[in-house]
Image (cartoon, rainbow, N blue to C red):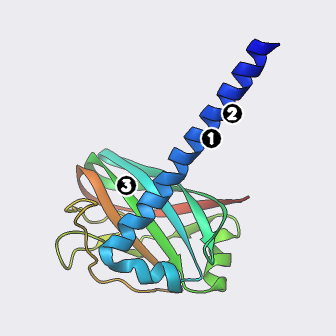
């Protein structure tokens, strides 16, 4: 009986430790965006979706991206989200980035959380980079670069149809001239 109890206690301890590490990933990503000059949006937005890491890769005529995140309503964690993107066009390489989508009001958050939501090819994201004026299309129609998470700064931005999207490139190199859109799913807690 004692070995089972010890295994159970060890398992619970590992779960606790791992959940703290997982939670820190979101806290660290939020701090990274706040340090890049958009801290006021976390306070003023009705809600936001935060993606610590989205991986993106492409070879020749096809590519894609995938990431998992959390959705917050008025600062409270309300569910999980997944982002998938498929692109068509010339592309080569791979990159990783963090992304946050702010919701200006309850209507925008409700639109995002009511099933599958998709940003079309025309949706814009502001790339938070060391270079002023840099921007990226969520469809992937431009290459992005960042000075890194420790020296990023904002360039442009603002709400469009109640949503504002910001990205910080974490690493990698990708060249692309492609078209596609980001598709999001939401699972309530």
Residue at 64% x, 34% y: name it.
13
- Depicted 2 relative to depicted 118: above or below: above
Picture quadrant of residue 168: bottom left
Say which mark, if any, is on residue 170.
none
In percent of width and height, residue 160 lies at 46, 86
Mark 3 surroundings within 10 Å by alpha-carbon count, few (fewer than 14), some (14 through 19), many (20 or more) = some
Using the rendered image of the protein, determine whether residue 39 is visible from the camera's viewpoint.
yes
Mark 2 surroundings within 10 Å by alpha-carbon count, few (fewer than 14), some (14 through 19), many (20 or more) = few
Q: Which residue is mark 3?
A: 88
Work out how far the residue at label 3 is from the one at label 2, CA to CA, in angstroms. 45 Å
Label 3: which secondary element: strand
Residue at 77% x, 16% y: name it.
4
In percent of width and height, residue 90 lies at 26, 53
Which residue extends farthest right?
1
- Depicted 141 relative to depicted 3: above or below: below
Q: Are marks 1 and 2 in contact (CB under 8 Å)?
A: yes
Front residue of this view, candidates 66 and 71: 71
Q: Which residue is mark 2?
A: 12
Work out how far the residue at label 1 is from the one at label 2, CA to CA, in angstroms. 6 Å
State which tag comes first along the sequence, 3 or 2.
Answer: 2
Work out how far the residue at label 3 is from the one at label 1, CA to CA, in angstroms. 42 Å
In percent of width and height, residue 11 lies at 67, 28
Say which mark, if any, is on residue 16.
1
């Amino acid at each position: 009986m004692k070995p089972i109890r010890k295994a159970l206690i060890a398992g619970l301890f590992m779960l606790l430790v791992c959940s703290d590490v997982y939670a820190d990933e979101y806290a660290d990503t939020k701090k990274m965006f706040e340090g890049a000059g958009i801290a006021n949006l976390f306070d003023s937005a009705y809600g936001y979706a935060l993606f610590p890491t989205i991986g993106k890769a492409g070879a020749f005529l096809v590519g894609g991206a995938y990431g998992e995140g959390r959705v917050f309503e008025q600062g409270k964690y309300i569910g999980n989200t997944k982002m998938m993107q498929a692109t068509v066009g010339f592309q080569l390489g791979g990159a990783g980035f963090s992304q946050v989508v702010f919701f200006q009001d309850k209507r925008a958050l409700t639109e995002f959380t009511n099933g599958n939501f998709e940003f079309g090819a025309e949706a814009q994201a502001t790339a938070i980079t060391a270079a002023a004026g840099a921007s990226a299309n969520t469809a992937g129609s431009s290459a992005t670069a960042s000075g890194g998470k420790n020296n990023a700064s904002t360039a442009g931005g603002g709400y469009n149809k109640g949503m504002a999207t910001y990205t910080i490139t974490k690493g990698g190199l990708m060249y692309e001239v492609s078209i596609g859109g980001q598709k999001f799913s939401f699972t309530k807690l």
